[in-house]
Structure formats: C-alpha cells, structure tokens
Image (cartoon, rainbow, N blue to C red):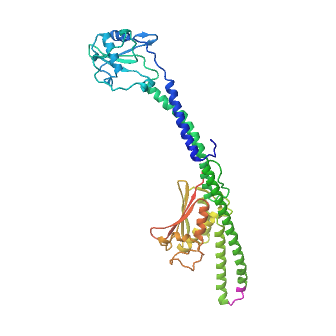
Amino acid sequence: MRRGAPLLAQALALVMVTAIAAQVITLAVLLSTPRTREVFTVGDIAEAIRLRAPVEREGQILSVRTAESPPRGWERDHHLEARARASLAQALGVPPRDLLIEPNLTILEWMQRPSPPPVTNPPRTAEPFPRGVAAIFPNFAVAARMEDGRWLIVSTPSPSPGPGTLLLFWLAANALVLGPLAWLFTRRLVAPIRAFAEAAERAGRGEKDAIFPEKGPREVRKSARALGEMQRRIAGAVEERTRLIAAIAHDLRTPLTRLRFRAEYAPPEHRERMVSDIERMDEMIGGVLAFARGEERLNRQRLDLAVLVQSMADDLVETGAKVRVVEAALVEVIGDPLALRRLIANLLDNALKYGGSARCRVLQESEDALLLVDDDGPGIADDALERMFTPFERGDAARDPCIGGVGLGLALARGIARAHGGDVWLSRLPSRGLRAHVRLRAAVRS
C-alpha cells in the first residue's frame, strides 16, 4: 500500500494482513503436526503389563513404570477409551475396574476428536475391539492395578511434539512472524506522525527553520499543509507588525529629538522636568520597539544558565545593587545570549525597583532549567499576578508610579522565554515579596 494512502486504509490493511498471516500460521502448524503410527496391539499392551517390562515393535518402545496411586484425571472415559479398557481387560483376564485408560493425542487429533458426553463408569457390556488381542491398540496410556495395590503405567510413544509443545510453537511462530510485521506497519504509520510532532515542537520553540513535512498518510499531509500555511501567515503578520511599529518609533523619535534641543532654551524651572518627560517617552518607544521585535533574529547557542545569571548579578553588584545568587546548579540551555540577558535583566530590574534586592536560584528539574528570582517588595494580589504580563500593565496601587518603567518588562520576558520553548510566571512568597519563575528547556548533555 502506498505511503500516502489514508490512515484508515493503512490501519485496515494492517489488521487484515495480520489476521490472514495468523490463519496461515495456524494452518501450517496443524498440517505439519507429525502423527505417531499405531503399531502396538492389545496383546503387546497385555504382555508389557504381565512382564512389567518394556515391549519393542518396529523401533517403537512401550514405556513401563510404577506409581503408588492412579494418575489423576483419568476417571472420565470416552466411548473409545471404554472399548480399549474392555479389550485389554479381556486379554488380561482382569475386571475393567482395575484398568484406567487415557489417550495420547496430537493437537490436530485433539481438535478433531468427537466430544460425546463422557461416562464416569462405562458399562461392563462395552464392546471390545474386533480381532481380540491382534487389534491395533490406539495411542493410549494404560494404568493397571497390581496385587500389592500399586499401579503399573504403560504408555505408547507419545505424539511428538505433544499438544503443549505445539501450542508453544504456534505462539512462538505468531510472535516471530506477526511481531516484525506489526512493527514494520506501525513504524510506517507512526514515522510521519512523529516527524510532524517534532516539527510542531520546534515551531513552538520559535525555530524559523521548522517546516512541517508534507508526507505520510493523507490526513497528516493535509494537516501539515494547513499548519504550514498558518505558520507563514503568522510570520508575515509578525513581520508586518514589527515594520509598522519600527516606522512609528522612528517617526516619533525625530520630533522628540527636536523637543530635546528646544528644552535647552526653556526656563530653568521647566527644563529639568521637560527633559525628564522626553527621556521617559524615548524609553517607552525603545521598550515598545523591543517588545514588537520579540523573538526576531535569535542567535541560538549552548549556554550555561548559572554562569549567565552570576555574571549579570556581579555586574549589578558593582553598581551597588543588592543581588545574590544563593544556588547555582550546573545546567545548560540552548538560546540567544542577548535575548536571555534581556529576560534576566528585566526580572532583576523589577526585583530591585520594587523590592530593593534580588535573590536568584538556578535549578534543574527533570529536563528543564529553572531560574527563580525573589524580591522583598510589597507583592501583588493573587488575582493580578497573571495580569502583570499584559503589555503596559503596571500593577496595583502598591506600586509607585514614579519609580519608572512602561509596563513591558514582564511581557517582553515572557515573549523571550516562550520563543525559547519555556515560560515565565509569578507567585507570592509566603511572607513578603514576589517570586519570578523562568522555565527553559535544558540542553541535552553530550
């Protein structure tokens, strides 16, 4: 079947081929079952019982052994067993109750054996086999009671292999033939789905070269085309948004520059406030532009997250800021150094502005790298934690509007984290302050 066939058709073909193969294996096992040729007569069985010794005929040997009690499970007789018991009792001159009969059947004979109601106590009038002691004795095992109360067990050669062996052989043949067949079919079905999932994961991490492969079942190819088209439209919309905001920012900075020159000629009592407002507007434009660019032009490389955090903390300490790295696990990530530095700088800047200090922890949890930034500020209400990531959101009344910032730091930090396949969120500390959580995908150690 073609690889591009619908998923339903391929799954149906797998079921049909597996079912047909199982039937072929079963038929082959049944037809290849060897049958033991019946060569012993009733007289041979009787002689083995009288002599208590094996008897040989045409290269086959009757086995003889003694037991303290009769074998279990031989009490229910089939009509053929009753006739064999009657024939052997007649040849030995003993009552039928001193004999027990149990057939040795091949698996094919066992499946073909007629199943009339068994009889617990066969009637004494059961007809012996014709020809008396010269009659061929079927493949039975015989248990005869001896004078001392023990039992003598005589067995004709068991069919080789026996039913249990053939059942194991049938199961092994099914596993050896159907296992690889099912694996090949399943691998063929799963491979394009796995490639599709890997491409989706890479696209979710913001990798620009993530392309949805249009191969495999019809449903997968259709989904790949739809998601590929959606990806192209989203990329086009982001690019258009970036160009638009960049143009607006450029146009706004031109009059701001003229205002800055004119502020120099303003009266001294107004000059400082005018320059402060102009610089604040310029900072807002820069923040908006950085937010709009988001994940553009990411240059990904292998980085030690703890080293990156420690270096930024050291730089801030030199300026007099209260920043400490209280725990630093050895964990590497794949990311853009400049973007990750901007993410960490925004979180540290928030902690210092609103809490006066920052404590950092770098941890590894399973396959993720975790950065925690704690502050001792007034905190934020629980229902406002998620709202803080909305662009231009500056928090509740506990925040001082004179401190600075345009409300884009956390939004930009989350955008950078999600562009790297991670996320950022906030939580309240038990006593006082906030904790910023940054989760990034840890790099696979080579």
**Figure check: 105 above or below 366:** above
- Where, quadrant-wise, is the N terminus in this rendering? top right
Residue 313 in view here: no
Q: Residue 28 appears at what percent x and percent y?
A: 52, 27
Residue 235 in view here: yes
Q: Residue 293 appears at what percent x and percent y?
A: 66, 67
Which quarter of the figure has residue 185? Answer: top right
What secondary structure is the magenta-colored segment mainly? loop
- Magenta range: 262-267
**Between 50 and 315, which is closer to the camera in this rendering?**
50
**Residue 266, magenta (yes or no):** yes
Picture mark count? 0
Which quarter of the figure has residue 131? Answer: top left
**Between 404 and 352, which is closer to the camera in this rendering?**
404
**Figure check: 394 above or below 169:** below
**Between 312 and 246, which is closer to the camera in this rendering?**
246
Q: Residue 199 appears at what percent x and percent y?
A: 62, 53
**Between 188 and 207, which is closer to the camera in this rendering?**
188
**Residue 429, magenta (yes or no):** no
Which quarter of the figure has residue 400? Answer: bottom right
**Figure check: 376 above or below 196:** below
Q: Is residue 129 left or right of residue 374?
A: left
Q: Residue 385 appears at what percent x and percent y?
A: 51, 70
